[in-house]
Image (tube, helix red, strand yellow):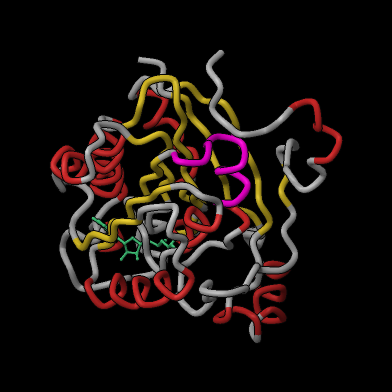
Amino acid sequence: MGKYNDLDLSKWREYTDIETDSLWIIDKRDNSGAHSGSYHGNFVPQIPHQLFSRYTKKGDWILDPFMGSGTSVIEAQRMGRNSIGIELQLDVAKEAYDRIVTEKNNDVKTKIIVGDSQTYDLNAVLNSINTDKVQFVILHPPYWDIIKFSESPNDLSNCGSINDFLDSFGKVVDNATAVLEKNRYCAVVIGDKYANSQVIPLGFYCMNLMIEKGLLLKAVLVKNFGETKGKSNKQGIWRYRALASDFYIFKHEYIFVFKKVK
Ligand SMILES: C[S@@+](CC[C@H](N)C(=O)[O-])C[C@H]1O[C@@H](n2cnc3c(N)ncnc32)[C@H](O)[C@@H]1O
């Protein structure tokens, strides 16, 4: 097995902060430094932090095709990893860039791109930085249409049906994993949704899509879902509705980890 992280196993007892269980309970968001919790639909920095600790080394290149507010890019540069973040919306990418540069690490390179991750020419990007592969891909797509991120037809949150969403997500996966080094890893962070009185298991659909593309499923992680700003003052209403009906309130999302073996 190739070495794909910087863990020194002679010190394994000291790594008390690194998750090895499949249930991740993260109570408080890391809001330190350039991290900002204000972008609707961002993930907590602890997710990329944990994944980069286990699956990357200093100097590796990490690709995030759904960069949003730049959480994984900030975490990558803190941890001495190079990174490429792609975001469809110019204003969102610019806002992320302005925060990312406030805690620049001169030992690493970061590349922020505005574009559509389904079609963006990643080989050209890698050529421009004199490399041909990335060593980790972190994918945090829109949870289909739960949050509408923009008006753009290329935005995955504007897909008209679950099949369109999976088709578009699959294009991003193909584009990104084509430049992922063999025997390295990628992760998908996603939750489910309700529609028409039933659960739409987006997580399992996306997991299956990755398996069908030949990626090896290495982990199914369940992470607690913090209260979103929108829902925090409506907790009682949701509980009443759940008790009065037949559904449960989502309190978890998934992190699926895959290895590229061919
Ligand atoms: C769930 S958010 C990612 C949030 C990010 N992990 C963070 O912590 O801020 C998904 C992002 O993907 C972007 N997006 C949607 N479709 C895209 C596409 N085709 N190409 C690139 N970005 C896209 C959205 O604008 C949104 O910012």
Give the x, y percent position of residue 202: 45, 47
Q: Is residue 179 above or below residue 83?
A: above
Quadrant in the picture for residue 21: top right
Tell whether 75 sits left or right of 63. Answer: right
Give the x, y percent position of residue 191: 52, 53
Residue drawn where x is 44% and y is 66% of the image: 104
Quadrant in the picture for residue 126: top left
Q: Is residue 232 above or below residue 169?
A: below
Residue drawn where x is 62% and y is 73% of the image: 32
Between 37 and 168, the residue placed more toward the observer is 37
Give the x, y percent position of residue 19: 73, 42
Q: Quadrant of the C terminus?
A: top left
Q: Is residue 212 above or below residue 34?
A: above
Residue drawn where x is 57% and y is 60% of the image: 45
Residue extent of the magenta highlight: 48-59
Between 142 and 9, the residue placed more toward the observer is 9
Residue drawn where x is 26% and y is 43% of the image: 172
Q: Quadrant of the N terminus?
A: top right
